Amino acid sequence: MGPDIIVPIGFFVMVLGIVLGVPLVRAYTRRVESKPREALPSGDMVARLERIEQAIEAMATEVERVAEGQRFTTKLLSEARPAAPQAIAAPQPALRPDGTVLSDAVRST
């Protein structure tokens, strides 16, 4: 079998696949589509789904409240930070006019 015969054989195999494959695929899809579909959910199922939906909405509301509290706390902490180093900073030593540092005992008198 040379390379000259491979192309015609491949062509006929492809045509045979299409000729047999298309009807088989159509028959399969008709069979799948003709199967009865599941019935609509019962009243009990609908009520249960509604309860689940309400529970999820309540959780979403609570999560939003927690997130809002977190944002508020973060805002308060970020506003308080610049003032904190000034409050914690060591007191500046008292200086004499000549530039020497006064001791605590001298400052208190």
Image: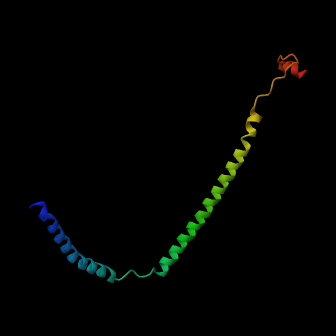
Residue found at x 62% / y 63%: 61
Residue found at x 14% / y 64%: 6
Residue 11's spot in the image, x, y percent? 18, 69
Residue 57's place in the image compared with 97, above or below, is below
**Quadrant housing the C terminus:** top right
Residue 105's spot in the image, x, y percent? 85, 19
Residue 83's place in the image compared with 97, above or below, is below
Q: Residue furthest front?
A: 4
User: What's the coloring here?
Assistant: rainbow
Residue 30's spot in the image, x, y percent? 30, 82
Q: Residue furthest right?
A: 109
Quarter holding residue 27: bottom left
**Quadrant housing the N terminus:** bottom left
Quarter holding residue 8: bottom left
Residue 42's place in the image compared with 74, above or below, is below
Residue 77's spot in the image, x, y percent? 70, 45
